[in-house]
Image: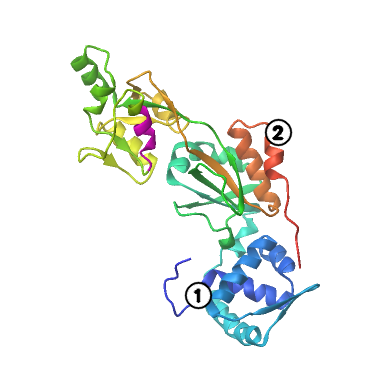
């Protein structure tokens, strides 16, 4: 984690440290603030690495403050009191309830949030869950109170468990006006070279276009007329506005295709070599997070057996 100031400890660890110090147990602290045992342990580890000293002695029946930990506890409680007086609430405090509903923190890329999740979120939350969305591209840090994450890649990833959400079949699309102009210029049957004469729109991973063009015998290197965007929702927006041609990524493009905002311009397709995954820490999930994951995976089309395997606990809780 990159801190805003080298003079400050990682602030999200202070309340976790204070709870563990008062209770003498990482497990008890985890239960009180709505984290997992492993998340508490990782936060304490981050704080100890920042300070360069051990704050706790790990014992069979729990944990005990070291002399350095005792001194730091007084400073941490003073800092927390100041923040509470300022009306701030720590994320860990907010993880237990929100208007009577259990809180789940989901780290998700903007593209999946806007193109797939938003339209389904109220149904997935129901009356008993509230999902706090953390929109980001960086690797999710479960020690920061994140319950679940959605990321795109090949997987698997060390230290976490992931489940592929869906497979993507990529095919070229364009805004209707651009598609009509392309059809007029090519006599209604544009080939790969015709598409390649137009600006190519893509996100940070251009491999899909490389593979699609390679199937037609064309190589791809970046060109000044092409446009790269950080997130796929911007690729889709640019395509809708007629700035170039993009590769559709169902199911993220289903709504735009159904609304006629974009149209297919070739029947040739390739399988995406990367995929979106639902990711969880390797330790046991909190009950609300497990329930949301179950609903989410059902919505994504997975069966009970696969979901049960993803939710099964393999971690042993300690201390």
On whether residue 208 falls in the magenta region, the answer is: yes
What percent of the width, then of the height, locates residue 218? 29, 27
Q: Residues within 10 Å of mark 2 (few under 14, many from 20)?
A: few
Circle 2 residue: 304
Question: 225 above or below 34?
Answer: above
Question: 237 above or below 260?
Answer: below
For the residue pair 289 and 26, the one nearer the viewer reads as 26
Query: Where on the picture, by quarter, is residue 235?
Result: top left
Question: 269 above or below 234?
Answer: above
First in residue order: circle 1 vs circle 2: 1
What percent of the width, then of the height, locates residue 68? 63, 86
In the displayed structure image, the side of residue 58 where residue 297 appears, left or right: left
Colour scheme used in the picture? rainbow
Q: Residues within 10 Å of mark 1 (few under 14, many from 20)?
A: few
- Assign a secondary structure to mark 1: loop
Q: Residue furthest top?
A: 187
In the displayed structure image, the side of residue 200 where residue 57 appears, left or right: right
What percent of the width, then of the height, locates residue 239? 30, 33
For the residue pair 17 and 160, the one nearer the viewer reads as 160
What percent of the width, then of the height, locates residue 156? 57, 45
The magenta region covers 205-212
Which is more foreground, mark 1 or mark 2? 2
- Assign a secondary structure to mark 2: helix
Q: Residue at x 70, y 53 (%)?
A: 284
Query: Where on the picture, by quarter, is residue 29?
Result: bottom right
Mark 1 to mark 2: distance in Å?
Answer: 46 Å
Which secondary structure dominates the residues rendered in magenta? helix
Circle 1 residue: 86
On whether residue 215 falls in the magenta region, the answer is: no
């Amino acid at each position: 984690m990159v801190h805003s100031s080298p003079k400050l400890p990682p602030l999200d660890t202070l309340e976790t440290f204070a709870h563990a110090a008062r209770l003498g147990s990482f497990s008890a602290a985890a239960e009180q603030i709505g984290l997992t045992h492993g998340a508490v342990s990782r936060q304490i580890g981050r704080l100890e690495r920042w300070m360069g000293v051990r704050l706790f002695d790990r014992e069979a029946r729990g944990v005990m403050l070291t002399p350095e930990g005792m001194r730091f506890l007084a400073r941490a409680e003073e800092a927390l009191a100041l923040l509470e007086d300022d009306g701030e609430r720590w994320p860990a405090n907010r993880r237990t309830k929100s208007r009577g509903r259990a809180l789940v923190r989901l780290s998700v890329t903007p593209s999946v949030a806007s193109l797939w999740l938003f339209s389904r979120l109220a149904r997935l939350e129901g009356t008993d869950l509230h999902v706090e969305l953390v929109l980001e591209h960086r690797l999710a840090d479960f020690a920061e109170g994140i319950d679940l994450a959605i990321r795109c890649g090949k997987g698997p990833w060390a230290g976490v468990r992931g489940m592929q959400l869906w497979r993507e079949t990529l095919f070229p699309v364009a805004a209707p006006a651009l598609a009509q102009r392309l059809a007029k210029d090519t006599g209604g049957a544009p080939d790969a070279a015709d598409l390649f004469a137009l600006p190519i729109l893509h996100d940070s991973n251009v491999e899909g276009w490389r593979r699609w063009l390679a199937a037609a015998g064309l190589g791809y290197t970046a060109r000044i007329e092409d446009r790269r965007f950080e997130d796929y929702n911007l690729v889709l927006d640019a395509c809708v506005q007629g700035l170039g041609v993009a590769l559709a990524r169902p199911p993220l493009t289903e709504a735009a295709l159904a609304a006629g905002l974009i149209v297919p311009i070739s029947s040739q397709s390739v399988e995406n070599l990367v995929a979106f995954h639902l990711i969880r820490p390797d330790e046991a999930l909190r009950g609300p997070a497990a329930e949301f994951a179950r609903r989410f995976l059902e919505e994504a089309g997975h069966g009970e057996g696969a979901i049960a395997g993803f939710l099964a606990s393999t971690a042993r809780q300690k201390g």
